[in-house]
Amino acid sequence: MKLVYGFIFSLCFVYANSLILPIFRRTIAPLGIGPVIIQKPTTPSYLNVDSWLPTPVGRVFQRAGIVLDDTLKAAVSAGVNVLCAVGLRIVPCRDRTDQNAGLLAPVPFQCLGKADVIFVLDSSGSIGSLNYQEALSFLANFAGSFKIGNDDFRFGLVIFSDNARKIFDLSSYNNHPELLEAILKTPYLLGNTFTDKALVMANSLLATTGRPGVPKVVITLTDGNSANAMLTFGAATALKNSGVTMMSIGVGNNILENELVVLAKSPAYVFTTDEYKNLQTLLYVTAQKTCKECNGVVAPIEDDKGIPNNDAPKACKTLADIIFVLDSSGSIGADNYIKMLQFAANITDRFTLGVNDVLFAEIIFGAVVQKMFDFNDNMDATSLKMAILHTPYLKQSTRTDRALNYVINSTMLDPNYSGARLNAKKIVILMTDGASDFPTQTKEAAQKVKERGLSIIAVGIANANMDELKNMASTVDDVFKADTFDDLKKIAEKVTQRTCDKISC
């Protein structure tokens, strides 16, 4: 039966490619940031420039909650139809009839540098063909956020199920059009999950087609535990011992966290999402992490002038490390989550950024805690705001206690790792919309944070528990409450001023 299904799938795949890829091959012109452009004589109605509205980020345009940068807007203004990869299809990026099909939003930067990166993609039967297309879209857009070339970033791709298969190696493609096409036409294997075989092949490709003296990265995307955990551990260890940086992306609830850690350099290099259709929420943070690991330089699409600051003056110039601790639980909802991120991004306007002034870090929490960026990751206003606004949404439970413990028990305060400064005042700005799952543990964790000399400002929204906010905050003056997420703007100045007062005193 598997053979029959595989044959039918192959026929459909070949037919789809015969229609799409010739057009794709003839006409695409790379932007270097994810999507591709196809010249059209007129602009479709759904890409009418007048319908795009500026967001608080500045020269960025959005519709239906999906971001377009200024480069794409200019293309649309010139009568260009901007198309994106959706699975194996090339469709208008912002076709409103296709909003929920995993459309790709461009990463707002391009990484300039040099590294050899191997994608290791799970192609087992548990994924399903539609989810597999989502994975291919994610990888294509990820690769699009790096400058491609023989003296720049190069990518290879290995897929695996019962066996591993090389789709292309590091020397195969040196431009975006050919690379994206190769990713999008990757076949779906079906079968089991022999991750170890793919890791062994990736190691071989790095040895035979990798460049000497160039950073090397292996990124594994999978939805399940490997068929042989011991062999997977051995293969991953061999890669790490040879100096390869490993990153893992887990999808769904069928994979153990321990296995994802095995497939990563450290827990900080593990990323998870609940469904394949939500992979795009991890695009910014994973691309930025890879860029930093490879000593790349982030070149924003928007420059500093493109992101207007608040009218408020840069009043706070003292030495301080500020950590955003953001609730990413399911009760918030996607729209409200965006409002919370905008609130956090706007707070940064009042502070002068720099190694001798204020630096920001961010973690999010649901059932688990994920660090988004360290103090030394975003040293300018543009990259800082983009990092905040592209924070993924976990949609999980509310383990506030774990987030607070993470602040003091992880590497967040380690100057050698995170860029935290020993003599800088430390402030935690915690935002939540409800009571924590374990109030007693949360109170105890908050107390430990304060005993380490950190101040906590607690911002509650909607159904947040006032007593718990008071227990977490350093003083009652450090508690703020907004009745709704729309009301966050009403308390923005108060929260900012209180933060400024605490680091200036």
Image (cartoon, grey):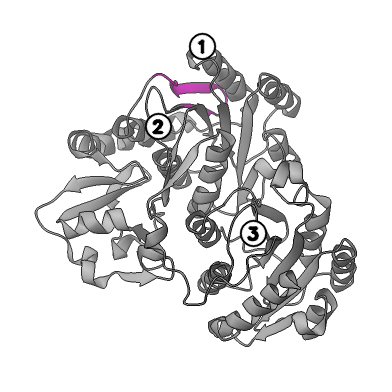
Residue 493 or 99: which is nearer the viewer?
Answer: 493
Span colored in magenta: 156-171
Label whose residue precedes the other's in the sequence (2 or 1): 2
> What type of secondary structure mainly makes up the magenta span?
strand
Label whose residue precedes the other's in the sequence (3 or 2): 2
Q: Nearer the viewer, mark 1 or mark 3?
A: 3
- Secondary structure found at label 3: loop
Mark 3 touches mark 2? (CB < 8 Å):
no
At label 3, which amino acid type do we have? Asp
- Secondary structure found at label 2: loop
Which image quarter: residue 401? bottom right
Q: CA distance from mark 1 to mark 3?
A: 46 Å
Residue at the spot 82% in from the left edge and 74% down from the top edge: 472
x and y percent of residue 303 in the render?
Answer: 39, 55
The residue tagged 1 is 208
Which image quarter: residue 60? bottom left
At label 2, which amino acid type do we have? Thr
Residue at the spot 83% in from the left edge and 52% down from the top edge: 409
Q: CA distance from mark 2 to mark 1?
A: 22 Å
Q: Is residue 86 above or below residue 346?
A: above
x and y percent of residue 398 in the render?
Answer: 73, 67
Q: Is residue 1 visible?
A: no
The residue tagged 3 is 357
Q: Horizontally, is 1 left or right of 406 in the view?
A: left
At label 1, which amino acid type do we have? Thr
The residue tagged 2 is 186
User: Quick one: label 1, few (<14), some, or many (20+) residues within 10 Å?
Assistant: few
Q: Is residue 433 visible?
A: yes
